[in-house]
Image: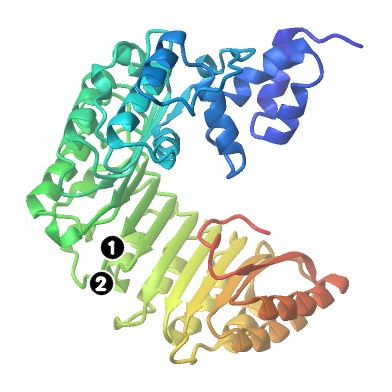
Amino acid sequence: MWYLDKDILYLIFEEIKNDKKTLHSCLLVNRTWCVTAAPLLWKNPWKYVTIKSKILLFNVIISHLSKESRDILKNQGINNLITETYQRPLFNYIYFCKYLSLFFLENEISSKNFEKSKMSIIRNEILKLFINGDKKYIHISIPDKFDCQLHHITGFEHCFSELESFYCRGNIDQNVIEGLAKVCKSIKSLSVGINSNNFGIFKLIEVQKNLNIVNLIHRGRLKKRKESFNKSLEESLIKHANTIQYLRIEWKPITRFLSYFVNLLNLEIYLPYNIIDINQLENISLPNLKTLRTRRVTPKVLANLIENTKGNLTEISVLYSDRYDNSEMFIQAIYQNCPNLKYFHLSLINNSNSLISEFENLLISCQFLSGLVINVYDEYYNKFSWDNLLLILAKSSPISLFKFKFFSSTIIKLFGGMVLFFDNWKDRNPILIRVGVDNYIQSEQMNEFINEYKMRGIVEKYSIGFGVSGYENFEWV
């Protein structure tokens, strides 16, 4: 058998590190391949866990317990975690871990249905495996209501001093966050479920040296959060305005803090309910912004944001309701200010036909548009004119546009419009399309319908899905 140096093997395996199946097969070639591939598979073992594999993974973790830990569990009557034919694994797999998922560990420990006191003992012994002086993590994820005092475990500072990514679900013990804030100063990506109890998050944000990605997700009842809390949160973010490039917020801004983020590339504003006036977002210049995603932002505010992006937007996603007047304002703002737009996602609630009249102008002005997602929730009114929209798309789409995703709660109307769409799609790039349906019967009907156009060369590739799952991202088929 021909021989490859371990360093060369490692470089090759790095290229396929996201292909678990292929990488796993490399374990079986010989010992050299196995030794080289194992650390990559165990760098983030939680990433590809399935219902079947999670039991095996937890058993492998348990097999790493020291004799001292096993004796502690046995003395507490926790015998069913320790097999009679105990054997240490071939590698110290836990040493390879760079990602620590307390989500996985907590779920598996809880699933054993031990008494609360015994669960605490199991948790402590398992955490000793992962938190010690031999480990260095780049990512940690923490579940909701987590109260284990990690910062009291020997080796905590060493393990998390180079942390780059942090995710917590929401209401975790403030001492845990404050303990992390004392040690973790190099976090680049921060994703946190925010509620009225997360005061420790201010400190964790403030001490970072190079914060790039901030994802602040609303948890709990927003109305219980005081404006003073949101204001303090915004003030802590301002201190990183020069380095933050991706920002997601889910509350009505209290201050004009976004005006400081001149280097922002990606902005997501998801409001939990309809808010008519947001003066704090008016006339804010975001000259480098490339991606804008919004939910329940009014046409006036949305148009104003778009107008102040200096023409650099390439991706826009809007979840929109027709309750507002002048709903076409933001479509006009797009085709007047976004010549480089590549992807546009529009989710409409109810009628919203006033937007269709502006679509032709958008298609004419945005000549680099290559992907379009349209979701229509029109179950009660059944008035959305798919025929008009799809006919405009067939006649006026730029040459670059051939990727589509459509979903309608009234699938019959979508069928009629797609006949016009496909029949008028001539001398263009073959279409990549994904269509959302509500049930299996509709799926079969749509599959038969689109396959006919695939046979005629109008459609290159297609897929049928249920509901709107997967429609948020601009990835096709």
Q: Residues within 10 Å of mark 1 (few under 14, many from 20)?
A: some
Q: Is residue 367 left or right of residue 216?
A: right
Left or right: residue 257 compared with residue 161:
left
For residue 274, the mark is 2
Residue at the spot 22% in from the left edge and 25% down from the top edge: 181
Residue situated furthest right in the rendering: 1
Task: Give coordinates of residue 308: x percent, y percent.
Answer: 32, 57
Q: Are marks 1 and 2 in contact (CB under 8 Å)?
A: yes
Depth check: give the residue in front, 18 or 461: 18
292, 467: nearer the viewer: 467
Q: Is residue 126 left or right of residue 432?
A: left
The amino acid on which the numbered mark 2 sits, given as a three-letter code, is Asn
Hey, which quadrant is residue 177 in on the image?
top left
Give the residue displayed 56% in from the left and 13% down from the top: 92
- Mark 1: amino acid: Leu
Q: Quadrant of the N terminus?
A: top right
